[in-house]
Image: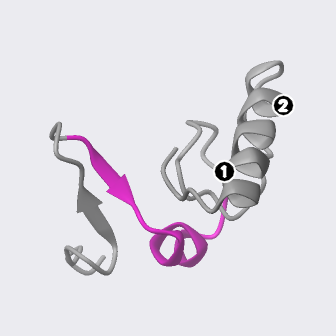
């Protein structure tokens, strides 16, 4: 496995949390079920009711132009 590259595979939030990019998650090839901020798989492996809540939050953010989770 190749080494992760900051800014391409992940970035770090001001509070110190590591966030994987959509590119990294897409390259990985599956939803892990952890509710990743940039999950390209519509949170398919996240359990309900959290999955629905996350999808609604993403939709609201897209409508307002806010990328942050």
Left or right position of 38 against 51: left
* SS category of the residue bearing label 2: helix
Which residue occupies the foreground of this view, 41 or 63?
A: 63
Above-or-below relation of 61 to 15:
below
In the image, residue 39 lies at what x, y percent?
Answer: 62, 57
At 25% from the left and 77% from the top, the residue drawn is 7
* SS category of the residue bearing label 1: helix
Residue 10: mark in rendering: none
- Residue for badge 1: 61
Say whether residue 52 is magenta: no
Residue 49 figure quarter: top right
Mark 2 or mark 1, earlier in chain: 2
Extreme residue in the front direction: 64
Give the magenta range: 17-30
Above-or-below relation of 10 to 43:
below
At 78% from the left and 50% from the top, the residue drawn is 59
- Residue for badge 2: 52
Left or right position of 32 against 9: right
In the image, residue 21 lies at what x, y percent?
Answer: 44, 68
């Amino acid at each position: 496995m190749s080494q992760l590259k900051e800014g391409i595979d992940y970035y770090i939030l001001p509070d110190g949390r590591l966030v994987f990019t959509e590119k990294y998650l897409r390259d990985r090839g599956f939803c892990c079920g952890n509710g990743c901020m940039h999950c390209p798989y519509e949170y398919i492996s996240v359990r309900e009711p959290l999955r629905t809540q996350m999808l609604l939050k993403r939709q609201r953010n897209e409508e307002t132009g806010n990328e942050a989770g």
